[in-house]
Amino acid sequence: MKLDLTRHTVLLLLTLAVLPAAASASPRQVVAFEAPRELLSFEDRDRTLDEIRAFGVTQVRQLVYFEDFAPRSDSRRRPSFDATDPNAYPAGTWDRLDALVAGAAQRGITLHLTLTGPVPKWATKARRDHVTRPRPDEFRRWATAVGRRYAGAIATWSIWNEPNQPQFLAPQYRRGRPYSPGLYRRLYQAGVNGIKATAENREDTFLLGETSPRGNSKVVFPLDFFRRMLCLDGDYRETRRCGRLDADGYAHHAYTTAKGPRFRPSDRDDVTIGVLSRLTRALDRAGRAGALRRGLPIHLTEFGIQSRPDRIQGVSLPKQAAYLAVAEHMAYVNPRVRSFSQYLMTDDDPRASRFNRYAGFESGLRTRKGRKKPAYRGFRLPLAVENYGRSDVLWGLVRPLRQRTTVTIEVDPRGRRGWRRLATVPTTSTGVYALRVRHRQGQRYRVVWTRFKGAAVRAY
């Protein structure tokens, strides 16, 4: 991965300088995992929770769709029931989520629930579909029921998944102007009020946003969405009085492209992980405007690197492991990032499409048939390698043991067969290490810790 010389020098100094501060950085930043299919499956839940815990991960995010819990979800006519009472829902409604909450607690894993649409047809204004203009009052009632059901059991809550995407919230635009930001603001307030109706939940962490990284004519650009949600113009000045939104952090899905984590989208309102500073500046300007609490942290609650067989967004399997580690390093050294999450254990199934059979996500650590990718080993022992002129800079951590230990860095020089020891490196008290070595074209590295070997990584 080539960078200009000035940026090379700055990043090299930052990489080397950050290591002594790693002990204070790690407790601040949580690594989470999202495996939505497996974790709500009675057959796969326990095995997947054990697998996640063995990685050293202690937080799981789960989407909770309103339409999956409501009675008569496809009906235009609202059923007569007390939607704030979890016991008023049909038998079996909560079983899968109950089992996840209990299984996570048994393993010391905290839960982050995202309450989101699609919603029941009867809970929308026009009652035509499941995403167009959801009614905040109905969403508040359902959030109240969820809050009552899991009072004291959930560490973190967020409201709506990717509200700037039309498959989750519509309309995105109305008469050529973004409409979803104002609608989301009302849904966020309704959802938080519903959850906080139960006193035990009031000290939980509440995240705003959950925005997707890029916009177009159908998807509201994330920073345009951000400003309009807060009633701010392009210069972060109030367009009307709507008061401060209360939140403990801002959640964002900072996906990148096949060009890698350092990719910089040209539109200034896009936010991929390579331009996370755009979101930081936006949060600071919104804080100064009084629209949010100052210094709000960033939570990267959904992230992954797409791999083959997706030939549009995907990269090779070795590059997936390499890019994922670089992205985590970028998040780790950013003092505003409070959490970083891996999206998917297993790739989505292919779709019956003539144009894009892999229109889902191939960001899993396993293929759709369950085979472990290199990223599986790379996630357990991430090793970020980037080339800075004559040097390669390596950064990594021992995720299963965030304590002082030692790792062995092995090298496979180009043109030779087999691995040899390059260096034995001590870690910090949080299992983090860094190393600078001489660059040789095509050279591969991997980390070895106890019986585990990481993925083979090149400096791109």
Image (spheres, rainbow, N blue to C red):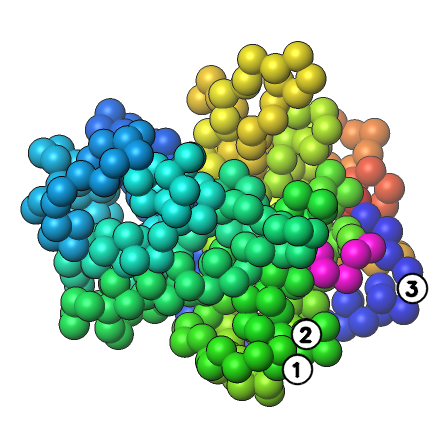
> Which secondary structure type mostly characterizes the magenta part of the structure?
loop
Residue 270 part of the magenta segment = yes
* Left or right for 68, reference 382: left
Comparing 306 with 26, the one in front is 306
* Alpha carbon distance from label 1 to label 3: 37 Å
Q: Position of residue 294 (x, y in %)?
A: 52, 84
Q: Position of residue 75 (x, y in %)?
A: 28, 31
Residue marked by disc 3: 5
What residue sits 18% from the left and 39% below the top? Answer: 79
Residue type at tag 1: Arg
Range drawn in magenta: 266-272
Quarter of the figure with residue 222 = bottom right
Q: Secondary structure at mark 3?
A: helix
Q: Nearer the viewer, mark 1 or mark 3?
A: 1
Asked if the residue at tag 1 contacts the one at tag 2, i.e. Cβ–Cβ closer than 8 Å, the answer is yes
Q: Secondary structure at mark 2?
A: loop
Mark 1 crowd level (few <14, some 14–19, many ≥20, 10 Å Cα): some
Q: Looking at the image, which residue is at 61% across and 81% down?
A: 238
Q: Is residue 385 above or below residue 378?
A: below
Task: Tell which tag, 3 or 2, sits nearer the viewer.
Answer: 2
Where residue 185 appears, x then y in whole percent? 46, 64
Residue position for label 1: 237
Query: As shown in the figure, which amino acid type bears the numbered disc 3?
Result: Leu
